Amino acid sequence: MEPGGFDCYTHRMSRQINKERTRRRLLQAILKTIHRHGHSALTTGRVAQLAGVAQPTFYVHFRSMDQALEEVAEWVAGELGPTFEASASAETDRPADVLQEALLRCTQTLVRDRKVAEVFLGNRRDRTSALGVRWMLLSESLRGRMREIVTRVRPGIAPDEAALHAELLVGVVFTLAEAHLDGRVPDIDRATSAVGRAMTASIANTSSVADAA
């Protein structure tokens, strides 16, 4: 390496690290602003101030607020996605245990960060925003995972019944998360376990949903 080359390399790396830290602070500031005040309060000035940088710095990292929102959506999807999209466990596992584990892990992951959870739950059905559109896809991945588990709990189940039970399971995850965030269900593990047992019994029942209705 040429004289001074190592110092130059170290300087470039340090600048890159600082740039990434600033970018992350801006993304976090957007999430905090939505959480505290809603979308209508989003301005580059407010976000920059909350991130502790000058307003022009926002445009060093993002072309527009829309692009920044897309990155926030991807960031949250990256936090939740690995759990929401994971395949069911090995075939040797008891299907009932797989369902219990899936419900528990998804709910625990969702409530791990209150700010992320509340913004996600509040925007997951908004088709007009980058947040909502991206998170609707994430929710659909969760439905797919639950359908896979339902068919293992009850092999041969009709596709429409599997889809219905999967929808109920997704609703359980979101409802339990909201109840926990509101303080109505302090012990999320116990509540999830109880609901999981009830859902397993319902899915395994030989009578169809239509017959039960």
Image (cartoon, rainbow, N blue to C red):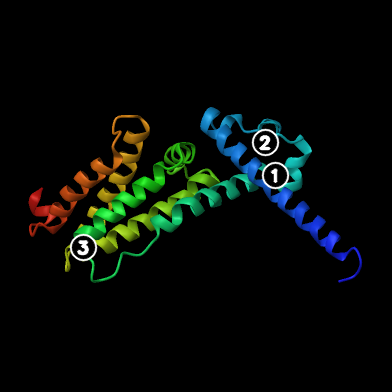
Task: Determine contact: label 2, label 1, CB under 8 Å.
Answer: yes
- Reading the image, the residue beneath label 3 is 95
Q: Picture coordinates of residue 143 (x, y %)?
A: 33, 56
Name the residue at 11% across, 57% down. 208
- Reading the image, the residue beneath label 1 is 22
Nearest to the observer: residue 156 or residue 109: 109
The CA span between labels 3 and 2 is 46 Å
Could you tell whether 34 is left or right of 98 in the image?
right
The CA span between labels 2 and 1 is 8 Å
Q: Quadrant of residue 147?
A: bottom left
Could you tell whether 16 is left or right of 186 in the image?
right
Nearest to the observer: residue 187 or residue 78: 187
Q: Is residue 9 above or below residue 92?
A: above
Instruction: Say which amino acid is labelled 1.
Output: Thr
The CA span between labels 1 and 3 is 45 Å
Nearest to the observer: residue 147 or residue 180: 180
Question: Which dot marks residue 51?
Answer: 2
Nearest to the observer: residue 6 or residue 169: 6
Q: Picture coordinates of residue 124 (x, y %)?
A: 44, 44
Of labels 1 and 3, earlier in sequence is 1
**In the structure shown, which secondary structural element does the residue marked by tag 1 occupy?**
helix
Task: Determine contact: label 1, label 3, CB under 8 Å.
Answer: no
The answer, for residue 159, to whether it is visible in the render is no
Q: Is residue 111 above or below residue 146?
A: above
**In the structure shown, which secondary structural element does the residue marked by tag 2 occupy?**
helix
Instruction: Say which amino acid is labelled 3.
Output: Pro
Instruction: Say which amino acid is labelled 2.
Output: Ala
Q: Residues within 10 Å of mark 1 (few under 14, many from 20)?
A: some
